[in-house]
Each structure stands twice: as structure tokens, then as C-alpha cells.
Image (tube, rainbow, N blue to C red):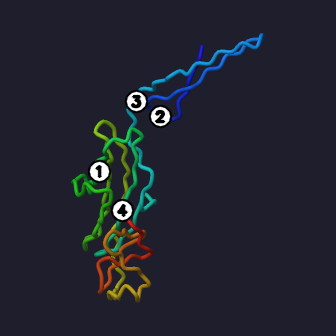
């Protein structure tokens, strides 16, 4: 008997060569095609940002959330973001803007391949701005201004000269 154990998430056709030798210098060689059927795999979220489940955001500030996901079957993925159970986006990232109310929000993202899904959840705590909080420029706060096709790797700061001032750095989408 011959047993073949495919690599994880492999499907399709592959070949193996079977060689048989006996004690009298006889040999036989045969190429065998092995077909591995596809098994439905759920999509998997491979990266989240922010990585903490609880996110603190000051009033009137913005916070970027994003995920990376993959599907072993290479199915088309769809995304749905829900803020307090209300659908707010279908992209792979979401920009949360805190209002003036001091609230705790639930943000969830669902990634689906049409059959299965993966998800992640954050709790967003909107904090009160410190007294005498006068908006400064992005440069004064040591921030970086993200441009088109970039995502903030930190918190978007409430500044007077840009709505895309990032507390840490920006990276390409």
C-alpha cells in the first residue's frame, strides 16, 4: 500500500515516482498521479491593528483599524465592519472617529469567503480630552502626515493642520 499525505491547504494533482527493487537486481519504476480534492477552508485573519482588544481614543480623535486575511482556497474575500451592531464599512480597514460623547463602543470585523468566516472584536473607550486641550500642528506633536494609499500605524491625532496626522508612522496599503 502507498499512502500520500499532502501539505496543509494543498489541493490539485501531483505526481510521485514509485521505485521497487528486488534482491536479484530487478527493478520497476512507475509514475503515479495523485489527486487531492479541495476541502473548504475558512478564511483566516492573519494580522490586526490595533493589536489590543481595548482601544482608548480621545474625544474628536480618529483611530484606524485594519486587518489582513487570507483564504487557503484562494476564494474572493468580503469584509464587513460593524460599529455597535451597525454596518459601517466593507473595506479591509475602518477609520473610527470619536465624537464628543464619552462612550464605549464595540467594533467588529467579519471576513467571509461566502461559506465560512473569521472575525475580530475591539472595545473602543472614548475618553475625555484634557482640560485646556488646544489643537496643535502635526509637527508640534511629533506626528507624521499620512498621504493617499497609506494607513496610520498608530492613532490619528486631533491637530489643526491635517486630518491624517499619525502618532507613529504611516505605511503603504
| Nearer-the-camera pick, 158 or 115 | 115
Q: Which residue is mark 3?
A: 38
Q: Which residue is mark 4?
A: 65
Q: Which residue is mark 1?
A: 79
Q: Is residue 25 above or below residue 107?
A: above
Residue 150, numbered circle? none
Q: Residue at x 78, y 11 (%)?
A: 23
Q: Is residue 89 left or right of residue 40?
A: left
Secondary structure of the residue carrying numbered label 4: strand
Tell me whether the residue at label 3 lies in contact with that at label 4, contact meaning CB atoms closer than 8 angstroms.
no
Tell me whether the residue at label 4 lies in contact with that at label 2, contact meaning CB atoms closer than 8 angstroms.
no
Where on the picture, by quarter, is residue 117? top left
Q: Earlier in the sequence, mark 3 or mark 2?
A: 2
Q: Earlier in the sequence, mark 2 or mark 1?
A: 2
Tell me whether the residue at label 4 lies in contact with that at label 1, contact meaning CB atoms closer than 8 angstroms.
no
Q: Residue at x 42, y 61 (%)?
A: 49
Q: Residue at x 30, y 60 (%)?
A: 105
Local crowd size for mark 4, using a 10 Å CA cut-off: few (<14), some (14–19), many (≥20):
many
Q: Position of residue 112 (x, y in %)?
A: 31, 43
Residue depth check, mark 2 versus mark 1: number of the one nearer the observer: 2
Amino acid at each position: 500500500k502507498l499512502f500520500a499525505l499532502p501539505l496543509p491547504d494543498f489541493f490539485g494533482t501531483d505526481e510521485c515516482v514509485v521505485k521497487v527493487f528486488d534482491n536479484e537486481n530487478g527493478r520497476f519504476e512507475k509514475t503515479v498521479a495523485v489527486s487531492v480534492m479541495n476541502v473548504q477552508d475558512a478564511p483566516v485573519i492573519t494580522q490586526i491593528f490595533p493589536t489590543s482588544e481595548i482601544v482608548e481614543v480621545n474625544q474628536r480623535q480618529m483611530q484606524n483599524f485594519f486587518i489582513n486575511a487570507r483564504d487557503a482556497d484562494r476564494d474572493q474575500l468580503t469584509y464587513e465592519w460593524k460599529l455597535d451592531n451597525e454596518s459601517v464599512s466593507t473595506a479591509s480597514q475602518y477609520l473610527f472617529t470619536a465624537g464628543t460623547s464619552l462612550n464605549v463602543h464595540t467594533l467588529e470585523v467579519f471576513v467571509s469567503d461566502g461559506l465560512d468566516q473569521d472575525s475580530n472584536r475591539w472595545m473602543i473607550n472614548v475618553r475625555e480630552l484634557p482640560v485646556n486641550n488646544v489643537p496643535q500642528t502635526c509637527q508640534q506633536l511629533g506626528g507624521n502626515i499620512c498621504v493617499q494609499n497609506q494607513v496610520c500605524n498608530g492613532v490619528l491625532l486631533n491637530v489643526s493642520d491635517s486630518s491624517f496626522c499619525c502618532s507613529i508612522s504611516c505605511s503603504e496599503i
